[in-house]
Image (spheres, rainbow, N blue to C red):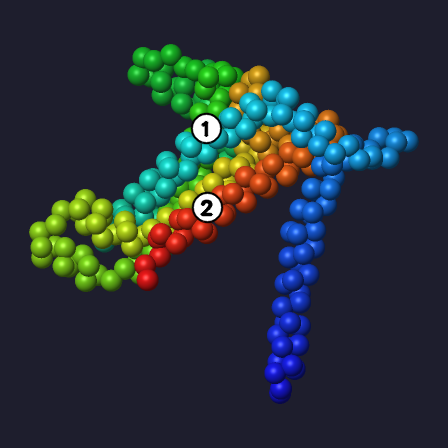
Amino acid sequence: MNITSRHIHAYLLLLPAFVFLVGFTHYPAVATLLDSLLSTPRAGRAAVFVGLENYQVMIEDPNFWRSLRNNLWFALATIPASIVISISMALWVNEKIRGRQFLRLSFFLPTVLPMIAVANIWIFFYTPGYGLINQILQAIGLRGQNWLGDPQLALGAVIIVAIWKEAGFFMIFYLAALQTLSPTYKEAAQIEGASSWYFFRRIQWPLLMPTTIFVLVNAAINAFRMVDHIFVMTKGGPDNASSLLLFYLYEVGFKFWDQGYASALTVVLLAILAVVGLVQFFVLDRRTHYR
């Protein structure tokens, strides 16, 4: 087989994946960008080119800025908390302790539960009056709260659910990374009399950085594509206090049927995720992998 035939053979093997990549990733992204420059088609009126009008509407839309601000707070709360908790759980279940298989299963169980089921479970926990959390608070003499109905508490309540569900998923990656580390590191640290905290800070944490970058990027993407829990638990309320960017996009596109504006929101969301990916590739990834 000559070189030309080998190249053709290689491209034919790549063709199915390329078709799916273009059809389900690149083409929708380009089509969405073009739709964001058009008006929303109505009955008897086709879409027309409006340029950046949809983006101008977005700049002047207080609900968009409220959703974006909520999403930033949501990301700032869920990302570090999920990473810290997942590392702690991985370090714990990586030790030779009794019942660690059960602990691993318990920590990972929220991940395999459907998001809608998780949301409904936590609705019961948060229910005013007879919800589990309020029952515990009342049992110790504290006043119960309307967790999902209070604008000051709704976003925080959803953040707790997201952390609870994601930490177990990220734990699996850290646990796999810990099990690839040579046991000689720990043996040498014990011989030198290093404490567990010093061993983690100086040895384990630096070696876990590639996994941390992977988890960090996935956590950031998850933070900006959260919609299921919001839809079931709060529907963005009360008074848009828990509305996130993707949920607001869903409302604009499928509740108000404003296709042009929803496309503009999608472009902004894609731009945010692209920035996250570029930062990971050009900044974090190059400073993490040891050569």
Q: Amino acid at mark 2?
A: Val
**Would you name the residue on which mark 2 appears?**
279
Q: Position of residue 2 (x, y in %)?
A: 62, 86
- Compared with 213, 223 (above or below) is above
Which residue does the image show at 44% across and 25% down from the upper left?
156
Point out residue 19 in the picture as x, y percentages from the top left corner.
Answer: 68, 61
Please give left or right for residue 208 compared with residue 52 in the image.
Answer: left
Task: Estimate the x, y position of residue 147 in percent, counting from the top left.
Answer: 46, 19
Q: From the viewer's perspective, is residue 279 above or below residue 184?
A: above
Q: Is residue 120 left or right of residue 176?
A: right
Label 2 crowd bin: few (<14), some (14–19), many (20+), radius 10 Å:
few
Q: First in sequence: mark 2 or mark 1?
A: 1
Instruction: Give the mark toward the camera: 2 or 1.
Output: 2
Q: Tag 1, which secondary structure?
A: helix
Q: Which residue is mark 1?
A: 73
In screen coordinates, is 49 left or right of 12? right
- Image coordinates of residue 135 in percent, x first then y, are 39, 19
- Res 246 quadrant in image: top right
Q: Quadrant of the C terminus?
A: bottom left
Residue type at tag 1: Trp
Instruction: Tell me the residue at 54%/39% (across/down).
Output: 272
Other residues around mark 1 within 10 Å, as few (<14) / some (14–19) / many (≥20): some
| Front-lying residue, 3 or 181 | 3
